[in-house]
Image (cartoon, rainbow, N blue to C red):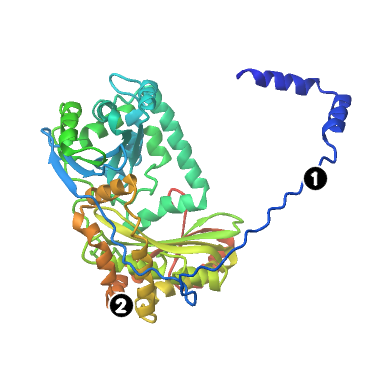
Amino acid sequence: GDPAYYKTVLRETLDATPTAVRDTARAWLSDGAFVLTVEPFPDYRASANGMDRSAVPFPTLKPQPQLPAFQRATLANGLRVVLAERQETPLVQMALLVPSGFAADRGGVAGTASLAAAMLDEGTRSRDALALSAELDALGARLNTGCGPDTITVSLNTLTRHLDKAVELFADVVVNPTFPESDFKRLQQQRLAAIQREKSDPNGVALRVLPRLVFGEGHPYAAPLSGNGDEAGVAALTRDDLQRFYARWFRPEQTTLTVAGAVTLEELLPILERRFGAWRAVSKDSGALPFEGLDASAPVAKRTSILYVIDRPDAAQSVIVAGCPAAAKREADEAAIQVMNTILGGSFTSRINMNLREDKHWSYGARTSLLDMRGERAFLCSTSVQADKTAEALRELKQEVLGMQAERPPTDAEVEKAVTDLTLRLGGQWETLSAVGDVMQQVVRLGLSESYFRGYAEALRGVTVPDVWAAAAHVARAESLVWLVVGDRARLLPELEALGWGPVTMLDAEMSQP
């Protein structure tokens, strides 16, 4: 019980003598006693229920995940509210979704949105960061801020009995941030350090550079995937820049609040009107949303190169990432796209992972994925391989992507397995409050309907081989892929040039040519 007891331990350590250590060893480091405890197994008897043990049990019920009904309302100031009521536990989770994200940095300084989001809970007109944290702790509540490609999110988790007070703190952060200068300087330095860490890590630098290669210079999604921006831009930011960003994008009439938990709409709305009712947009007009007008179906601009290298001298492994633009999530064909991705690279038994890991033993894992964004998204292929197999791995990856559309179209067995994998995991998908909240946020963030998730299991079961083949041609467009390798240039360059994919372009971590 003495917080200063460490001083006593340090004093005893400093005062120890060889004689004292020997005496202690003789007293305690003896052979000791050996105790053997024997607990015989009980007598078991076979069950008499006649269970068939000749075959492995297989689930027969089709999972039918239950998603609560969404209730909608709009506050007097235009703030949209979506509630999913779930009374099993006395908790409420809410998330305020501001349509902006780091896509809103286009035309300004990359990293502004992310830093502005991080600064929201650093102080308000009535509370500094420490006071805010202390009040949240006293309630057992948790408040977080985050920034994605299309959305800044402010989230709150609280006990239902503390909802009114917790929402007061939540609204204070959203409506009255002050962006204190001292905290801004601290977070600015942290953000610069984070950028340096990204640039020192092969995977980090790849994900900084790839979006600009995939989407092209000036595109809203051409920023580093972390949203952290670049060092020069972040270093030049001021507190005024963050305030201007906030004034432009934080507008109640463009914003949606999702709420999930043990509260009714009749209980919730008066609290929200009381706490958020005075919120008004600071500026007159925010202009078009960052993701409006994007079209992934448009032809990709002709590239002078499709293969890029960032030098990591003496690297024992090479990081390989590839990507191309893909249409935003559409409800009609999304089930087929997910089945296609599962077969190609979205699961452990996928084609590219079985090829590079299980067959070739060149990699610990290879995968494909889709980055969900509101305007359009990116189809990605990624892996790390031993350096001497880099060129061969590139050839294998490209061949696997091409194979889905030509030489090796998906088979009935592959589609059946992928559908089974995807549907069987749905049974418990929305059991937790946070999972329900995530679904609600996806509906808002990606512009989906509730029916998309409610009918997703049946949509998966209806996917056919032709559907998957069409999805591969639509999304995994091999002819549009741009490839980036982070590895030892001196070792890799001759092999990469021998691939015959055109010129190999060298880049640095800021995507300039050295």
The tag earlier along the polypeptide, 1 or 2, is 1
Residue 103 lies, in percent from the top left, at 28, 46
Of residues 383 and 107, which is closer to you in this image? 383
Of residues 373 and 189, which is closer to you in this image? 373
Residue type indicated by callout 1: Phe
Looking at the image, residue 4 lies above or below residue 422: above
Residue 179 occupies quadrant: top left
Q: CA distance from mark 1 to mark 2?
A: 65 Å
Residue 244 occupies quadrant: top left
Mark in the foreground, 1 or 2: 1
Of residues 33 and 445, which is closer to you in this image? 33
Residue 70 lies, in percent from the top left, at 19, 48
What secondary structure is marked by label 1? loop
Q: Residue 114: which disc?
A: none
Read off the residue under disc 1: 34
Q: Is residue 23 visible?
A: yes
Of residues 312 and 154, which is closer to you in this image? 154
Quarter of the picture containing the N terminus is top right
Residue drawn at x 29%, y 62% is 326
Residue drawn at x 49%, y 41% is 196
Read off the residue under disc 2: 465
Residue type indicated by callout 2: Val
Residue 316 lies, in percent from the top left, at 61, 59
Residue drawn at x 40%, y 42% is 230
